[in-house]
Each structure stands twice: as structure tokens, then as C-alpha cells.
Image (cartoon, helix red, strand yellow):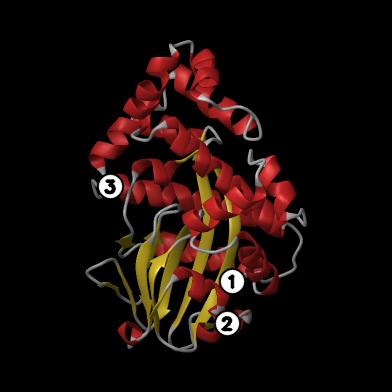
Amino acid sequence: MEDYNKVIESLGVRYIKAKNLVLRQSVTVRNAYDVGNNLILLHQGKITFGDEDQTVEENELLFLPGGRATRVGYGQNAASRVISNDDFITNKDRFFTSNDQLDYIGDAEESHSSVVFEAKVFDSVNFFASLDVPAFVIKKNDRLANLVIKIIEESIQDLPGRERLVTIYTENLVVEVVRYILQNNMFVEQLATNSTYFKDPRLIDLFNFIKENLSGDLSNKVLAGVANVSEDYVGQYFKMLTNINPQDYIEYQRMERAVSLLRTTKKSIRDIGKEVGYKDTAYFCRRFKMMFGIPAGKMRRRESAMNI
């Protein structure tokens, strides 16, 4: 348990957004995807997920890990309309409306509350993505349900200390999710592996170096110098500990940073591409769409127009 405490203490948590949404028409997204982790509290209605269309019951929570595409259906007749993540993001206002009235949170038919956040070990690697966990349901957990409601309530009110409370509640939420996983003996093998490799100082140095040098040269030759291992061995070493090769990890980090810049700045697509290590804007755009299923410019327009 001490190892898990160290992992939890090392987590850097960042709130991204929260919304209370009311369904307008049923839909299934065959490859729902976001870089952030999404915790959904179902108030009324029906949500299904996964290839076998598992059902989320009312007052249960669905955890969608960031960086992993998942089939998600909203509404009683979700299977009758199946669309891509690109189409869903582009036309989200056709399927959902945002409810920002405190008195009506949870009261509308076919409604849910959603909190999106990141949780990174040593502020470098996505914790839940590193576990390679699938989407899963959290049952009978009033603490988590109440935290989701608190975050929603704070996010829609312009009150002093709002940002600080949202940060505190989101950190609490992440701890409760990890506790739920541990208490229910979920993903035991992945957690045991992670608690071991997150203590390797050379790997931590690599994580930090990659994070601070996304715009620069991150070849295996450079990484080998950081970890003080041979160039031929660094790829094997990294994959042995993380189950992913370093160049794939680097691309994910670059794209994750690009999404953050799209959401929080007005920088051009070209400048964002260069800032995350892509000199060729066209290649950056192709890789971005391949990873997220949506063009970078369209993601920005979606975020600025609706933020849901």
C-alpha cells in the first residue's frame, strides 16, 4: 500500500472542464475519444459503453480513460444512430444542451454531469493511460457522485475562490477513483507494474526531459544520453518499463500539448505544430487527425464555440 501512496502523492491533477448536459436525441459514438479522463455521473436516462454495450444505471458513474477510444451510447435508442467521434464533436449541440441552472442539476430526463481532468505521475505521464485501463463503471459511490456535483456547481457559479475549490475537489475526485480501483482489486497487474517503474530514477529523468523538450530533438540517441544507457538499448529499456516505445510516447505527449494549446491559446495551427516539435505543418495536421479523428482547426472551433 505504501507504493500506491507514493504514486498518489506524485500525481499532478488538473481540472479541464465540467458540464451538466441534457440529451436532445439518442446517439452512439463508436470511437469517443479525449486526451483528458472523463468521469460521467448519470442522473436519469441510459448510457451504454464498450463493444458489448454494457449499461450504466442511474446514479452510477462511468469512467472513460483519456487517450483511449471507447464506444459510448447516450439515450434509450442510441443504437439507432451510430456516428464517429469527428461527427459527434462537430455536431454536439444537436445531441446535447448544457444546463447551467443549479436548481435543475439532475432533474431533467436523460441528463448527466461530466468532469474532464488529467492526472499525471510526476507531472509527466498520464496515469490512467499508462495503466491501459478500459472504460469501467463505478457503482454505489456517493463520495464520487457528490464530488462531481460540487465541481459542477462551482464551475457554473462566479464566486470568490471558485478555481481553488474546483482544484481541491478535482484532486479529491482522482484520489477517490484510485481508491475505488484498489478497493475492488481492479487492474492489479498494471498497478503493480506502475508502482515499480515509477520509482526508477532514470525513467523519471526521461519523462521530465521529454516534457521540457517537446519542441526539440528527442531521438533515441538523445534519450540514451539522458538515461545513461546505450542508444541501441534505450528503446527496449523504455518499453520494458512502460509497455510503449519512446517515440510513440513522445508523439502522444506532443499531441496532448497541442490539444492544450488549442484549448487555451489563440496561437496559429502552424505555431502550435512548431511548438510541439513538428516543422512541417501539413504533417502535424495529418498526425493530429489520425490520432484524434478530427482536424486541429475543427477541435479549436468546437472548444471556443461550445466548450462542452
Q: Is residue 49 visible?
A: yes
- Is disc 2 in contact with disc 3, using a CB cutoff of under 8 Å? no
Q: Quadrant of the N terminus?
A: top left
Q: Position of residue 27 (x, y in %)?
A: 40, 82
Mark before the other along the chain sequence, 2 or 3: 2
Q: Amino acid at mark 1?
A: Ile
Nearest to the observer: residue 66 or residue 3: 66
Picture quadrant of residue 265: bottom right
| Residue 279 vertical position relative to residue 246 in the rendered view, above or below | below
Q: CA distance from mark 2 to mark 1?
A: 9 Å
Q: Position of residue 104 (x, y in %)?
A: 56, 84
Q: CA distance from mark 1 to mark 3?
A: 32 Å
Q: Nearer the viewer, mark 2 or mark 3?
A: 2
What residue is disc 2 on? 93
Q: Amino acid at mark 3?
A: Gln
Q: Residues within 10 Å of mark 1 (few under 14, many from 20)?
A: some
Q: Secondary structure at mark 1?
A: loop
- Name which of mark 1 and mark 3 comes first in the sequence: 3
Vertical order, 10 against 161 (above or below): above
For disc 3, the marked residue is: 183
Residue type, label 2: Asp
